[in-house]
Image (cartoon, helix red, strand yellow):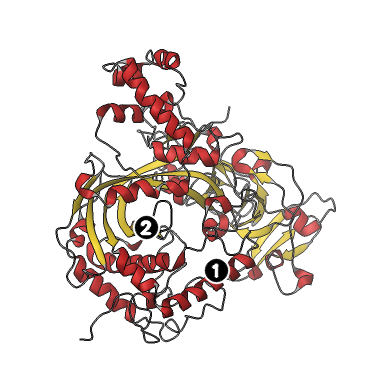
């Protein structure tokens, strides 16, 4: 059995957003690929289960009823043990390496290169070329991973087909060398040569080019290296990508806030053990469950009849209305808008402000400081080449493009829980309705809707008019981004650490109306944050004023302010990286449906502004 070496450390949250299953992790001398959850050892952490019934139920509607648990990544308490089997398994990928001295390009399976582990610096694991003819001072050189791979939009990934690139289908006992002819590192300055037959080709031919005669188009091999298998399917074109390219891996993550629905200890105990109790479809089955130690310890003091009454009622509710990911915000809205009756727990605490920020009383209904919150996030799959931020509803996600985390339907998913704080702002429905009824706003809504249709049509999505969020959402989303930018300047958090959650539904919606935003920050490696965001919430009037002042002008004006026609198939109006766009992990809509002219006057127009401000 091959020995397993520890090769580095990453934070739990990185396993969802940066280095999840199927992604490439670059170490100083090695490139690795995170394996599927089939290879994960889930027996090492007995307390690794993350309980969040609402999220689990919503994920079951997407992944199937076999899904039973959300588990935290396995953690090795002794990080110095280089032979530890606790942790997330990875394999070397790409498998092709390059010697920097003799330029030999070969796969590690050909045994040209030898693995060397460092027991004191696991991140310094490397391969070296012992037989290098150009070694210096008798020391074998450390080889580096190849920069080139192929991938397709169905999520498959493979090593670059070097033999086919040089020889096509002709047989050759090739020995490859990779040369960099310049210092730029561009593919046009890199060439691969076969030392056996002398064939030579520049790597620029492997990328799309206007010159069709020198463009190389590899075919997808249907390889899923994280699952250790090749799948069958129709042959289609793949793309050459760089190992460190940003389009190598895009995660599909679902998240929810842990909202307590009551303080009844029996209800909490049933909720905590629901992953077992949901199988109690009769009184006799429930009676048998009472022999399970965890059930007995938490529910033993209650009568079977009392427990069965609660379980039966909960089962009927679950069977009648199975939760979907799109339903997760409704319970959050109900609790956040009624802070005086909200339960207080170790993970959840609300404090409503006594007064509305001065000057904004006609716009804002209430402000609630969230002193404590807990968010649970689960990874369900990933894509390559194309980001899933292009899709607004889970029903539209291209299932044939989402790569699975395991070979079989998963019974668990990797998840993390983070704790932090936030600010919730509820807007007055009367003010929203008054603004929406203005003729200029309705005309601008038509422009946004037209752009929405063209954008969906260009991506061949069904029903070009579906899932348009409307001007209510556009207004709240824009305000959220403006306030996030202002708060990052004052509260000390990095821009990427503050996230948004938009609650926007019209009055005719089943759960509506909703008009509010939650800005929050959370950290996976602590029991909370330092209170900076909540503290700034007590000076919210100052921050709203500062945010609106900043939105009047942009460093890219007048070009930014003039971008209101939306005729270029973009889904944003007066918004750009200089004024509105937020980091990818902060925005829930991929920086779409933004327009700062909806908030305040700009150098281009002032007839759309929601906030009517007096001139100084």
Picture quarter containing residue 526?
top left
What residue is drawn where x is 43% and y is 47%? Answer: 327
The residue carrying mark 2 is 513
480 lies above or below 234: below
| Quarter of the rendering occupied by the N terminus | top right
96 lies above or below 392: above
Residue 151 % position (x, y): 65, 54
Left or right of 55 in this view: 3: right
The residue carrying mark 1 is 452
SS assignment at label 1: helix
SS assignment at label 2: loop
View extreme (left): residue? 354
What residue is drawn where x is 51% and y is 81%? Answer: 565
View extreme (front): residue? 508
Residue sitting nearer the eye, 35 or 474: 474
Residue 541 % position (x, y): 20, 69
């Amino acid at each position: 059995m091959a020995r397993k070496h520890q090769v580095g450390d990453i934070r739990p949250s990185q396993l969802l957003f940066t280095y999840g299953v199927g992604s490439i992790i670059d170490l100083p001398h090695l490139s690795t690929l995170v394996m599927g959850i089939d290879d994960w050892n889930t027996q090492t952490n007995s307390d690794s289960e993350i309980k969040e019934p609402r999220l689990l139920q919503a994920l079951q509607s997407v992944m199937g009823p076999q899904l039973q648990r959300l588990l935290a990544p396995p953690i090795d308490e002794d990080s110095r043990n280089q032979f530890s089997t606790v942790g997330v398994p990875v394999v070397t990928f790409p498998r092709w390496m390059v010697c920097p001295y003799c330029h030999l390009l070969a796969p590690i399976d050909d045994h040209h290169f030898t693995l060397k582990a460092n027991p004191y610096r696991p991140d310094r694991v490397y391969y070296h070329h012992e037989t290098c003819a150009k070694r210096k001072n008798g020391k074998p050189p450390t080889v580096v991973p190849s920069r080139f791979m192929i991938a397709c939009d169905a999520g498959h990934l493979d090593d670059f087909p070097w033999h086919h690139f040089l020889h096509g289908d002709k047989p050759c006992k090739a020995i490859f060398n990779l040369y960099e002819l310049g210092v730029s590192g561009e593919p046009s300055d890199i060439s691969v040569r076969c030392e056996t037959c002398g064939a030579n080709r520049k790597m620029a031919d492997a990328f799309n080019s206007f010159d069709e005669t020198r463009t190389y188009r590899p075919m997808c091999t249907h390889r899923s290296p994280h699952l250790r298998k090749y799948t069958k399917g129709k042959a289609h074109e793949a793309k050459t990508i760089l190992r460190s390219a940003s389009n190598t891996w895009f995660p599909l993550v679902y998240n929810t806030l842990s909202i307590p629905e009551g303080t009844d200890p029996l209800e909490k105990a049933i909720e905590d053990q629901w992953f077992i109790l949901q199988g109690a479809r009769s009184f006799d089955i429930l009676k048998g469950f009472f022999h399970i130690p965890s059930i007995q310890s938490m529910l033993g003091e209650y009568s079977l009849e009392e427990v069965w009454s609660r379980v039966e009622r909960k089962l009927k509710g679950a069977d009648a209305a199975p939760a979907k990911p799109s339903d997760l915000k409704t319970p959050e809205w109900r609790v956040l808008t009624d802070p005086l009756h909200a339960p207080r727990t170790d993970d959840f605490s609300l404090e409503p402000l006594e007064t509305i920020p001065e000057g904004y009383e006609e716009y804002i209904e209430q402000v609630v400081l969230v002193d404590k919150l807990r968010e649970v996030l689960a990874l369900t799959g990933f894509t390559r080449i194309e980001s899933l931020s292009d899709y607004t509803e889970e029903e539209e996600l291209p299932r044939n493009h989402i790569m699975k985390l395991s070979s079989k339907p998963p019974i668990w998913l990797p998840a993390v829980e983070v704790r932090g704080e936030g600010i919730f702002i509820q807007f007055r429905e009367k003010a929203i309705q008054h603004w929406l009824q203005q003729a200029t706003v309705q005309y601008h809504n038509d422009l946004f809707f037209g752009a929405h249709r063209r954008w969906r049509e260009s991506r061949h999505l069904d029903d070009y008019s579906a899932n348009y969020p409307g001007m209510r959402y556009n207004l709240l989303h824009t305000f959220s981004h403006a306030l996030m930018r202002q708060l990052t300047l004052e509260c000390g958090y990095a821009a990427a650490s503050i996230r948004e959650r938009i609650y926007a539904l019209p009055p005719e919606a089943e759960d509506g109306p909703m008009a509010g935003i939650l800005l929050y920050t959370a950290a996976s490696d602590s029991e909370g944050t330092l209170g900076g965001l909540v503290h700034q919430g007590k000076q919210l009037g100052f921050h709203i004023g500062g945010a609106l002042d900043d939105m009047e002008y942009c460093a890219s004006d007048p070009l930014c302010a003039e971008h209101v026609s939306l005729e270029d198939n973009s889904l944003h109006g007066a918004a750009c990286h200089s004024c509105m766009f937020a980091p990818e992990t902060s925005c829930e809509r991929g920086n779409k449906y933004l327009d700062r002219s909806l908030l305040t006057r700009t150098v281009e127009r002032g007839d759309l502004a929601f906030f009517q401000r007096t001139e100084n």
